[in-house]
Image (cartoon, rainbow, N blue to C red):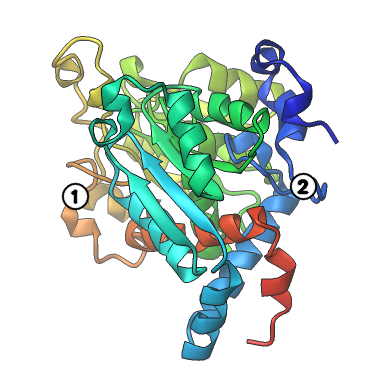
């Protein structure tokens, strides 16, 4: 097995994501990650194992006895939720996932409340967290920070796993896991996810959830991907290159209604104007044709589904909320279960939970 403490940072940073993966797996070599940093770490067998584990956890948790069992699984572990970027769902679902497994948590949600305010480096902050906790779940506006911190800890005297809960504009692997989990559950009694058409719409240029989910979908057979956005916000070239290299059937268009007609799933996103280089730049882009409402709902297949990573603005009309095909509220709750599965598997408790008597 390759280890992060066996390679210099500059050499590791220069590797492709596929080349980095072996350095991030658990010592057991079972394919599960030790550090979860990007979507490319998950192939289909690992995805299916995590989804099965999430299903098992949610089933066990239905009874009081089962819930008490789960709370004892990782009662000896502590996790730091280090969120230097605003978050509601991602923070709360990771917190709830830890609580389900009995993990004691601490949190920093604003660098101004930590010693970083006094000038402490992020490297020193993370080393401090590793002294008190057994896992760091981190979210940052800085691209690649989770990756750098994983390398730092792996080359320290106390290496603990890091889970990337959103890093800059590039990756959001645990969101992609809950998106895949939602899609697999949505189609599990309808022939599965293979052979489906998934439409992405909105700010595809800066939407890290789109980037991560698009890659995970390449692990499934004959899944066609359609990207619908204004030209200024269309899917970036590096995503297109990955799809082309892997022989994926995809389309880039600006016609949402036409795309919805053939869609099995529609994944809407908001405009990511927090990344604007100039104030108000996104507001000058005409996004009026990239919203999902009653007319689009009429075009969606009867067994289709509508997803959104949330928060939303006006890109999905509230009239869609009560339609059974609207999955974004279930999608949000699914995040708690799949993140609990990832945390349990990271600590090596997949087999214990899958084989328990509850």
Q: Secondary structure at mark 2?
A: loop
Residue 191 appears in the rendering: no
Q: Position of residue 340 (x, y in %)?
A: 52, 61
Residues marked 1 and 2 touching at CB (< 8 Å): no
Q: Of discs 1 and 2, which sits in the foreground?
A: 2
N-terminal-most mark, 1 or 2 = 2
Instruction: Please say if 88 is above or below 247.
Output: below
**Residue wearing tag 1:** 317
Left or right, residue 285 beside residue 229 = left
Q: Please rate how many residues cluster around mark 2, counting C-alpha atoms within 10 Å: few if below 14, some from 14 to 19, many from 20.
A: some
| Nearer to us in this view, 149 or 141 | 149
Q: How many marks?
A: 2
Left or right, residue 291 beside residue 212 = left
Q: Position of residue 350 (x, y in %)?
A: 69, 64
Instruction: Please say if 295 is above or below 327.
Output: above
**Residue wearing tag 2:** 31
Residue at the farthest right position: 1
Left or right, residue 35 beside residue 89 = right
Q: Please rate how many residues cluster around mark 1, counting C-alpha atoms within 10 Å: few if below 14, some from 14 to 19, many from 20.
A: some
Q: Position of residue 275 (x, y in %)?
A: 28, 20
Residue 15 appears in the rendering: yes
Quarter holding the N terminus is: top right
User: Which quadrant of the view contains residue 283?
Assistant: top left
Q: Position of residue 143 (x, y in %)?
A: 45, 22
- Residue at x 48%, y 84% (from the top left corner): 62
User: Which quadrant of the view contains residue 116?
Assistant: top left
Left or right, residue 292 beside residue 254 = left
| Nearer to us in this view, 330 or 160 | 160
Quarter holding the C terminus is: bottom right
- Residue at x 60%, y 43% (from the top left corner): 161
Q: Secondary structure at mark 1?
A: loop
- Residue at x 30%, y 46% (from the top left corner): 310
């Amino acid at each position: 097995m390759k280890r992060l403490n066996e390679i210099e940072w500059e050499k590791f940073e220069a590797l492709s994501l596929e080349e980095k993966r072996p350095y991030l797996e658990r010592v057991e070599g079972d394919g599960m990650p030790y550090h979860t940093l990007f979507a490319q770490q998950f192939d289909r067998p690992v995805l299916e194992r995590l989804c099965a584990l999430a299903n098992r956890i949610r089933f066990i948790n239905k009874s009081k006895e089962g819930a008490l069992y789960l709370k004892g699984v990782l009662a000896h572990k502590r996790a730091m939720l280090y969120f230097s970027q605003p978050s509601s769902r991602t923070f709360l679902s990771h917190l709830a996932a830890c609580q389900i497994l009995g993990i004691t948590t601490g949190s920093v949600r604003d660098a101004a409340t930590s010693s970083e305010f006094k000038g402490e480096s992020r490297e020193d902050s993370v080393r401090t967290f590793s002294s008190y906790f057994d896992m760091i779940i981190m979210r940052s506006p800085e691209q690649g920070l989770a990756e750098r911190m994983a390398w730092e800890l792996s080359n320290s005297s106390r290496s603990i796993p890091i889970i990337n809960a959103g890093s800059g504009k590039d990756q959001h692997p645990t969101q992609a896991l809950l998106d895949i989990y939602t899609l697999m559950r949505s189609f599990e009694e309808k022939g599965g996810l293979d052979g489906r058409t998934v439409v992405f719409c909105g700010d595809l240029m800066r939407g890290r959830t789109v980037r991560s989910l698009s890659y995970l979908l390449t692990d499934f057979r004959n899944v066609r991907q359609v990207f619908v956005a204004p030209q200024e916000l269309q899917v970036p070239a590096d995503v297109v290159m990955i799809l082309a290299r892997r022989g994926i059937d995809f389309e880039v268009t600006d016609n949402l209604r036409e795309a919805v007609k053939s869609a099995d799933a529609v994944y809407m996103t908001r405009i990511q104007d927090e990344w604007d280089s100039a104030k108000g730049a996104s507001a000058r882009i005409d996004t009026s044709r990239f919203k999902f409402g009653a007319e689009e709902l009429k075009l969606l297949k009867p067994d289709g589904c509508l997803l959104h990573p949330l928060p939303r603005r006006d890109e999905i009309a509230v009239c869609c909320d009560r339609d059974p095909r609207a999955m974004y509220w279930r999608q949000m709750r699914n995040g708690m279960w799949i993140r609990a599965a990832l945390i349990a598997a990271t600590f090596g408790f997949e087999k214990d939970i899958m084989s328990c008597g509850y």
